[in-house]
Image: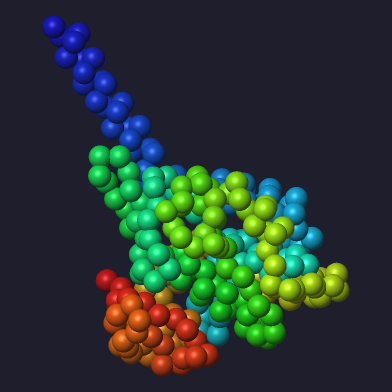
Amino acid sequence: MVLIVVFFILFFILLFKVDFSNSNYNNSSNYNKKGQKGESQVSRVLSMVCIKYIDNLLVIDENNRSHQIDHIAIRKNGIFCIETKNYNGIIFGNENDANWVQCFNRGRKNYFYNPVKQNNSHIFHLKKILGNKYYIQSVVVFIKDNAYNIKLDNVIGLSDLDNYLINYNNNTNYSDEEINYIYQKLISSHKELSNDEHIKNIKNMRRDVKSGLCPRCNNKLVLRNGKYGDFFGCTNYPKCRFSTKKILN
């Protein structure tokens, strides 16, 4: 009888441990390792299909805020700003949601900031570095190929990344000289910053949004009404197109 009780206790401990490790609720060190593993997989794809690419570009804007861009792919057919997510579960959301959601077994959920909006902010700063002379295409890659419920052409799984980059067409055809110029311009903007300092910057940006300040250009956010209802938009529109459904808590 005692052996049976011990068996069930060990079984439930193991079940909880497996479930916990398959979620996005792990401690930050495990989460960072998971993110780095996903980014290395994307980097391998880029090394095979790109003339030039940059991993983990960190830039500081004029308001002394840091922005970490996972990948930039530079090809003859375009410049691509790539945000990588190595998340488990099934992903739900749309372009205008403030947050997307991971859905796990037994009904558990985890909400995270909309990566399309996150990447739009990255592109805003990359364009400024390039003198607003180049179009930059946003791409969000889910390593687990689990974003099939997201109905956006530029939100893809890792298995589709190479085909997406090769087949993308907006009538761009950069010369080798232009590609080298773009690469050098971006890589020269890279800054060294500790992970703790970068996290502190992210918290400061959330604080600014909560205070009604745009995290991109530091202008005020005002309540507006649009096609999808009320939202907060930047007073510097159309130069700055930052928007959010609500002021962050």
Q: Residue at x 29, y 76 (%)?
A: 246
Residue 61 image position (x, y, % from top left): 56, 80
Total tally of numbered discs in the picture? 0
In this view, 18 is above or below 80: above
| 32 lies left or right of 135 | left
Residue 200 in view here? no
Residue drawn 61% across and 50% down?
160
Left/right of residue 184 with respect to residue 9 in the rendered view: right
Q: Quadrant of the N terminus?
A: top left
Between 172 and 112, the one nearer to me in the picture: 172
Residue 40, image x and y in percent? 62, 48
Q: Quadrant of the C terminus?
A: bottom left
**Coloring scheme of the render?**
rainbow
Placement of 243 over or under 94, stated as above or below: below
What residue is drawn where x is 51% and y is 46%?
Answer: 145
For the residue pair 151 and 1, the one nearer the viewer reads as 151
Can you tell which quarter of the image residue 92 is in?
bottom left
Q: Is residue 181 left or right of residue 99?
A: right
Q: Is residue 105 visible?
A: yes
Picture quadrant where residue 82 is located: bottom right
69 relative position to 186: left or right: left
Q: Residue 192's x, y, as percent?
A: 61, 67
- Within the image, what quadrant is residue 60 found in? bottom right
